[in-house]
Image (spheres, helix red, strand yellow):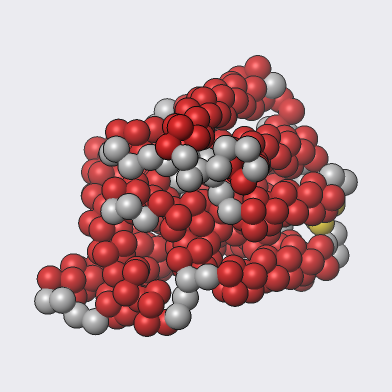
């Protein structure tokens, strides 16, 4: 594989075998955790690059669907492994953290990166508005079970637990249906609203910048398979060391899930969004940041509910009040900042500041 400047992150793949060896020799949990976290970053990028290369062989629409489908593969794999290990609260926190990280931290840093070079950048209000609305919809889906379990359906009773699980299953189906409808709306029936000539030019320039030579289908599929297997293996190692590491550092499960794992799973996408914003391609950057947040809320969450049923590890949409409130506040400030289709570095500072405030709160609640 030829290493270009954007793919210099692939050198960190050396940490993948190191993680496996450290786990086999039962090294210190903290060392294993740190090395596994680093190893996940290039693997997540390899999944993204593989799907990007595949998309060049199947046209813009199908290619976009491929990117949408596999865009959050790393997060899903990590979460499924953690669910299988019974770390349900950790998974829920990582979902919250991934959404917040995308729509607050990465959106904010992208605005700062782009605002340093240009006083003001323009982006598609239609796209930002749709993503913001879909995130609000997902939060409502999370709010109903959370509010009911905190008031009427107290989970202490088995009957109420079954009701919450049934409610979560039903809401998961609804959210997934809305997500599929959103794909049809965005890529088929109303594609003209979201793909302007300027965005197409940015996308073409981005492809020419990042992929000087496209992989053939066999190579792209092989790299995708290898990277996903790697994520499965490293996720097992990471989840196996997370509890001991949390105890030794004094971090609570919510903080580890929301801040550390929430950022790591999307690290490759995060770097891409910031680099694109720095180049003045703010529409593509927002598409990655806000789009990824929407995918997690409407696609990843329902998928995890389904996997919980399959693994016999009940996964409900009952979150903590703090998680729910932070998601609502994040969606509100995102909508306020993105509604005019203009961005500057100070708006990025405000979004980033909100994320830091929320992260500090996660540290203190455990």
Q: Is residue 32 left or right of residue 293?
A: left
Q: Is residue 295 left or right of residue 356?
A: left
| Rendered image quadrant of residue 215 | top left
| x 60%, y 59%: residue | 101
Q: Is residue 244 above or below residue 336?
A: below
Q: Is residue 260 above or below residue 161?
A: below
| x 68%, y 56%: residue | 326
| x 25%, y 44%: residue | 225
Image position, residue 196 (x, y; %): 73, 34
Q: Is residue 73 left or right of residue 325?
A: left
Q: Judge whether residue 137 can be spotted in this image.
A: yes
88 vs 358, nearest the viewer = 88
Count of number-bearing discs: 0
Image position, residue 269 (x, y; %): 51, 55
325 vs 166, nearest the viewer = 166
123 vs 332, nearest the viewer = 332
Viewport quadrant of the N terminus: bottom left
| Rendered image quadrant of residue 90 | bottom left
- Residue most toward the top? 189
Q: Is residue 231 left or right of residue 203?
A: left
Image position, residue 52 (x, y; %): 44, 43
Image position, residue 240 (x, y; %): 26, 64
| x 75%, y 54%: residue | 329
- Residue most toward the front? 157
Q: Judge whether residue 176 can be spotted in this image.
A: no
182 vs 177, nearest the viewer = 177
């Amino acid at each position: 594989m030829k290493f270009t400047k954007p793919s210099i992150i692939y050198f960190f793949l050396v940490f993948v075998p190191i993680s496996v060896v450290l786990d086999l020799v039962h090294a210190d949990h903290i060392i294993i955790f740190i090395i596994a976290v680093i190893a996940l970053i290039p693997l997540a990028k390899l999944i993204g690059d593989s799907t990007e290369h595949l998309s060049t062989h199947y046209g813009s629409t199908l290619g976009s669907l491929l990117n949408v489908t596999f865009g959050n593969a790393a997060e899903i794999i990590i979460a499924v492994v953690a669910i299988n290990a019974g770390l349900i609260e950790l998974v829920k926190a990582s979902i919250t953290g991934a959404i917040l990280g995308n729509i607050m931290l990465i959106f904010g840093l992208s605005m700062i990166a782009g605002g340093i070079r240009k006083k003001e950048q323009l982006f598609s209000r239609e796209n930002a508005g749709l993503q913001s609305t879909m995130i609000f919809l997902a939060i409502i889906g999370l709010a109903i079970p959370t509010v009911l379990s905190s008031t009427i359906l107290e989970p202490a009773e088995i009957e109420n637990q079954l009701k919450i699980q049934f409610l979560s299953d039903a809401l998961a189906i609804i959210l997934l249906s809305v997500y599929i409808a959103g794909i049809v709306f965005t890529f088929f029936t109303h594609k003209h609203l979201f793909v302007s000539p300027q965005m197409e030019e940015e996308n073409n320039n981005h492809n020419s910048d990042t992929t000087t030579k496209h992989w053939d289908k066999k190579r792209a599929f092989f790299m995708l398979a290898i990277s996903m297997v790697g994520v499965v293996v490293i996720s097992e190692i990471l989840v196996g060391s997370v509890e001991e590491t949390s105890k030794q550092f004094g971090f609570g499960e919510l903080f580890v899930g929301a801040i550390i794992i929430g950022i790591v799973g999307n690290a490759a996408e995060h770097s891409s969004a910031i680099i694109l914003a720095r180049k003045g391609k703010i529409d593509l950057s927002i598409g990655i940041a806000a789009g990824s947040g929407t995918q997690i809320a409407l696609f990843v969450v329902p998928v995890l509910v389904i996997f919980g049923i399959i693994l016999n590890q009940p996964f409900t949409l009952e979150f903590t009040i703090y998680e729910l409130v932070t998601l609502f506040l994040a969606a509100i400030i995102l909508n306020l900042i993105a509604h005019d289709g203009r961005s500057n570095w100070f708006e990025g500072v405000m979004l980033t500041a909100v994320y830091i405030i929320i992260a500090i709160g996660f540290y203190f609640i455990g």
